[in-house]
Image: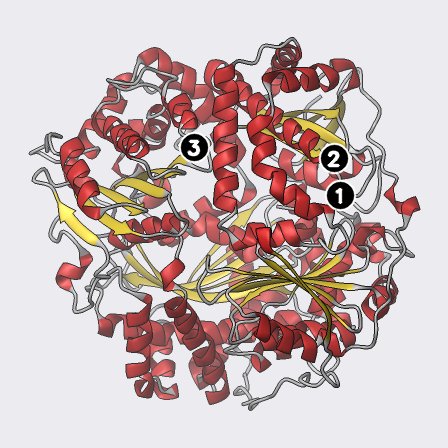
């Protein structure tokens, strides 16, 4: 997460990740091969489904986005829930062992083999373990027969040929324990406590996929073999292949590779998960952790009523979802007021493991106002159940829902192969039919007259009737007699009357006329890059790249001013501006009103303060491109400067800070980022005093000059015509008064200094678990003025990464993953660095520094093999090839290319530079920069240690 993104932190996605496994259905059993076998819904006819005689399922789909790539998946319909008490963590441990030796691949051979085919460990080669699913994924950058054969061979080795060498298991223990350590966050601890409260007496809270430290440290080979032989069986498996393929050829290969895999006749059945309590009485739970967000949940939970995925079941589910969306919308309005105790809140419903049907509201609040937050949730939930929703509220959600369906249908032809492969197996595991986006739109339109306010009210309210609420509060606040105290707050609120909601009626967007449309003064084509460059008479510059990479998708970026370099009256004003500006709305519409006004339109409103520009960005559609430009121009000309935006940020800041200081990686973002830049207050996360020192007038003074007069550069990439761009930009930004021809360079603001080298590491402290530590080494390098030199550093970093993985993960078992990156600035002269950061146990900090120094010295001494360069270079070249077919990559490359025209030549030389960098260049660079006496080091330790 970037530092600027932290200033716009949304808490709910963080919590959703922790709850995801708890909300997954167990999926279909052996009674049906595919969900569409028991449904009136038609499966996507482009997908070829099949099943081998041994029971292995497969699905194949030809797809050309991106071209010449293939995504391969293998999943099993069991995860940590299949473990015995003395196997807790084994399912996940086996996922790691898949990379540590099989019958036909010796330990240490798999990853180098894949790297030589252009796959990068992590992004392209990965695996995952959930409660009820284990999966393996390979994203092949080339669709040639050798790559596909290799991928299927590796999947078969994983499925049936793992050897579980006892010594390899012992070597991997440190890696697994490191992952457990890294994932031991306050959010994970809250999630586990919530499971114990919501699903008491069931297996779910006892089977966290990471396992227990005690079992991970001691479990022996026989328990691995037991799990593997009973759950890695063809009857439980599915292989998915999507990409630039011939389905006939792939089907034949699957039969050839997996056909002789012997089915196990005595397949171990699914475990007994336990039962959800019927008619559970009103209950209250409490979780206290000094580092946790204040999170309040209220749920209605009842035993699951199983039914097939059909058109009618989806219709009923959508009715309830509209109610969830409306209640979430109401809660967002309360949050947007800026004076609420709530920081985030949303309603939802789900099914957990085919065991429990749950309706719920989850809210994040300021800790000291938790009681007010509980009351707000109680009253809004009761207002919805007693009075229902309004037609205007339903109309807003219907417009958004139909637009989403329409966009999905329009964009279906260029869906990404990796996403499609994951959607296909996820549909199987979730008991859902994998249908076409067009069919979803058709079903919605056919049933539109049945989606009445009465039907939505009834479907949504039914989720909350005949089930007593279950309340759970997690907070850093100590509460005496929490069950009675929290329950009393709820009951006191329930005694207060609530009024019915008001129907706000329809509104229209106020910004559609910016004056006479501007005209294009200059047009040029750059044929080799496929660009059109336009400059309007008022100076607004446009770069357009029309592509077919994504059907009906347009990506837009508007940049102006100098961003971080602009003068500021107080520290941290830039960090707050990134959040507060759009949250303050427009002159005619609050931020909350905008959601209603723009309902059903595919527009975005993202604003950021970058190193050397202010930036609006969004992804839209050709149909809504003009509206998108209206919105951006409105923010340019009439920002709202409402106090609620600043109030929201001030409410969130302490919780963001709490999250950052709860882990070593958070300290990197909060403190180290600033220290690396000589204490420059434009970086890191502001402290309490700095946040308090920023008022709305300071933010306005910081942004106003550039908003009013700075040159504007617009970059547009995607499925849109030049004529449409000229019309929409001409009517908005082209209609503005003439902009300044140039803008100050602010050379005095470009002076950033790397810290002085350290003889001993700087010590910083985090507030998380007492066994989490981190060792970090930063070597100063150079700026980005010479592109090839920056690319050589990136390739050197990739070689370093291979060595770090082999030494610190595989040989030493110190860490789950060593972090490393290279940074070369195109804003700050002579500024750049190469970083290695390693999450380790306290007792391994010194040994980790010693290992990093040994590896750096080896690189500087020329210990770089041609095979290592191949394994580092090939994935980078494959990523570049893919990027040339990717709108997001082109948007990044072309941004600011008017003010920085050298960026076009950088694009042209990109692939050749990486292909031509020699071993000698890498050795010379390592010798020049990877010297211990120039490095800056920081050790991050738990607060309670010496």
Closest to the observer, 303 or 450? 450
Q: Nearer the viewer, mark 3 or mark 1?
A: 3
Which quadrant would residue 341 be assigned to in this image? Answer: bottom right
User: Residue 837: where, in percent of width, then height?
Assistant: 63, 27
Which quadrant would residue 777 be assigned to in this image? Answer: top right
Q: Which mark is residue 178?
A: none
User: Residue 290: where, in percent of width, then height?
Assistant: 63, 43
* Mark-to-mark CA distance, 2 and 1: 7 Å
**Residue at (49% x, 23% y) in the render:** 870
Q: What kind of colouring is applied to the model shown?
A: secondary structure
Instruction: Identify residue for label 2.
Output: 672
Closest to the observer, 184 or 392? 392
* Mark-to-mark CA distance, 3 and 1: 33 Å
Query: Looking at the image, is mark 2 or mark 1 earlier in the sequence?
Result: 2
Vertical placement of 743 versus 803: above or below?
A: below
Determine if residue 829 is in view.
yes
Q: Secondary structure at mark 2?
A: helix
Label 3: how many Cα within 10 Å (few below 14, some 14–19, many 20+): many
Query: Looking at the image, is mark 3 or mark 2 earlier in the sequence?
Result: 3
**The C terminus is located in which quarter?**
top right
For the residues labelled 3 and 2, say whether their Cβ atoms are less than 8 Å apart: no
Instruction: Identify residue for label 1.
Output: 684
Q: Is 801 situated left or right of 251 in this image?
A: right
Q: Nearer the viewer, mark 3 or mark 2?
A: 3
Vertical placement of 166 versus 453: above or below?
A: above
Q: Secondary structure at mark 1?
A: loop
Q: Secondary structure at mark 3?
A: loop
Vertical placement of 57 versus 544: above or below?
A: above
For the residues labelled 2 and 1, say whether their Cβ atoms are less than 8 Å apart: yes
Label 2: how many Cα within 10 Å (few below 14, some 14–19, many 20+): many
Determine if residue 771 is in view.
no
Instruction: Identify residue for label 3.
Output: 119
């Amino acid at each position: 997460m970037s530092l600027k993104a932290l200033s716009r932190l949304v808490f709910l996605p963080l919590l959703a990740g922790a709850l995801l496994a708890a909300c997954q259905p167990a999926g279909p059993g052996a009674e049906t091969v595919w969900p569409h076998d028991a449904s009136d819904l038609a499966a996507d006819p482009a997908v070829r489904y099949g099943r081998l005689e041994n029971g292995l399922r497969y699905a194949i789909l030809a797809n050309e986005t991106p071209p010449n790539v293939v995504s391969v998946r293998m999943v099993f319909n069991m995860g940590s829930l299949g473990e015995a008490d003395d196997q807790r963590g084994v399912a996940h441990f086996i996922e790691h062992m898949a990379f540590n030796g099989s019958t036909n691949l010796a330990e240490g051979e798999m990853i180098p083999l894949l790297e030589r085919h252009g796959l990068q460990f992590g992004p392209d080669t990965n695996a995952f373990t959930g409660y009820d699913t284990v999966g393996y994924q390979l994203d092949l950058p080339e669709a040639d027969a050798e790559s596909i054969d290799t991928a299927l061979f590796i999947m078969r080795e994983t499925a049936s040929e793992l050897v579980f060498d006892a010594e390899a298991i012992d070597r991997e223990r440190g890696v697994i324990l490191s992952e457990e350590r890294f994932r031991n966050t306050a959010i994970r601890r809250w999630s586990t406590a919530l499971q114990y409260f919501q699903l008491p007496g069931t297996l779910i809270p006892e089977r966290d996929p990471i396992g227990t430290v005690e079992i991970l440290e001691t479990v022996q080979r026989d328990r691995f073999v037991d799990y593997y032989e009973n759950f890695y069986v063809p009857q439980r498996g599915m292989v998915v292949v999507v990409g630039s393929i011939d389905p006939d050829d792939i089907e034949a290969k699957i039969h050839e590779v997996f056909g002789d895999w012997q089915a196990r006749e005595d397949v171990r059945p699914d475990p007994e998960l336990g039962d959800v309590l019927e008619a559970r009485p009103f209950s209250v739970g409490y979780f206290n952790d000094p580092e946790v967000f204040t999170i309040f949940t209220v749920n209605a939970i009842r035993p699951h009523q199983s039914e097939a995925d059909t058109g009618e079941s989806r219709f009923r589910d959508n009715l309830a979802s509209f109610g969830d969306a409306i209640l979430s919308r109401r809660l967002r309005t309360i949050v947007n007021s800026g004076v609420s105790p709530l920081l985030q809140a949303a309603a939802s419903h789900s099914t957990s493991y085919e065991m429990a049907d749950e309706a719920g509201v989850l809210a994040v609040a300021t800790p000291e106002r938790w009681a007010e937050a509980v009351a707000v949730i109680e009253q809004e939930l009761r207002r919805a159940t007693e009075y229902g929703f309004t037609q205007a509220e339903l109309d807003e959600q219907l417009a958004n829902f139909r637009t989403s369906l329409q966009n999905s249908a329009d964009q279906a032809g260029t869906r990404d192969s990796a996403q499609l492969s994951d959607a296909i197996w996820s549909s199987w595991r979730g008991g859902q039919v994998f249908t076409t986006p067009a069919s979803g739109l058709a079903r919605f339109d056919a049933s539109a007259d049945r989606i009445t306010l009465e039907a939505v009210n009834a479907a949504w309210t039914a989720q909350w009737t005949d089930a007593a609420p279950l309340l759970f509060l997690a907070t850093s606040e100590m509460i005496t007699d929490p069950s009675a105290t929290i329950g009393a707050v709820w009951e006191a609120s329930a005694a207060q009357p609530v009024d019915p909601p008001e129907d706000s009626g329809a509104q229209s967007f106020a910004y559609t006329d910016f004056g006479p449309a501007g005209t294009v003064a200059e047009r040029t084509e750059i044929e080799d890059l496929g660009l059109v460059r336009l400059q309007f008479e008022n100076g607004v510059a446009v770069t357009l790249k029309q592509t077919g990479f994504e059907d009906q998708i347009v990506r837009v970026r508007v940049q102006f001013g100098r961003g971080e370099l602009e003068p500021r009256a107080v520290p941290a004003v830039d960090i707050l501006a990134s959040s507060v500006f759009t949250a303050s709305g427009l002159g005619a519409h609050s931020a909350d009103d905008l959601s209603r006004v723009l309902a059903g339109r595919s527009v975005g409103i993202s604003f950021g303060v970058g190193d050397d520009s202010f930036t609006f960005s969004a992804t839209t559609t050709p149909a809504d491109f003009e509206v998108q430009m209206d919105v951006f121009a409105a923010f340019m000309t009439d920002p709202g400067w409402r106090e609620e935006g600043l109030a929201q940020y001030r409410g969130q800041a302490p919780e963001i800070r709490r999250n950052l200081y709860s882990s070593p990686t958070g300290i990197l973002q909060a403190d180290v980022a600033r220290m690396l830049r000589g204490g420059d207050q434009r970086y890191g996360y502001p402290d309490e005093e700095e946040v308090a020192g920023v008022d709305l007038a300071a933010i306005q003074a910081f942004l106003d000059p550039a908003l009013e007069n700075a040159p504007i550069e617009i970059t547009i990439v995607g499925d849109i015509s030049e004529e449409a761009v000229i019309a929409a930009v001409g009517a908005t930004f082209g209609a503005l008064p003439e902009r300044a021809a140039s803008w100050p360079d602010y050379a005095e603001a470009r002076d950033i200094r790397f810290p002085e080298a350290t003889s001993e590491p700087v010590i910083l402290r985090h507030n998380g678990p007492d066994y989490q530590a981190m060792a970090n080494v930063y070597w100063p390098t150079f700026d980005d003025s010479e592109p090839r030199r920056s690319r050589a550093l990136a390739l050197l970093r990739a070689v370093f990464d291979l060595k770090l993985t082999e030494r610190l993960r595989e040989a030493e078992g110190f860490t789950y993953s060593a972090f490393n990156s290279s940074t070369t600035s195109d804003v700050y002269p002579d500024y750049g660095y190469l970083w290695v950061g390693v999450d380790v146990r306290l007792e391994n900090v010194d040994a980790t520094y010693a290992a990093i120094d040994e590896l750096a010295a080896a690189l500087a001494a020329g210990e770089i093999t041609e095979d290592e360069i191949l394994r580092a270079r090939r994935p980078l070249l494959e990523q570049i090839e893919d990027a040339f077919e990717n709108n997001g990559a082109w948007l990044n490359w072309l941004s600011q290319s008017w003010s920085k025209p050298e960026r076009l030549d950088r694009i042209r030389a990109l692939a050749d530079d990486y292909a031509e960098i020699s071993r000698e260049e890498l050795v010379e660079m390592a010798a020049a920069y990877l010297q211990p006496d120039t490095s800056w080091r920081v050790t991050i330790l738990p607060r309670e240690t010496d």
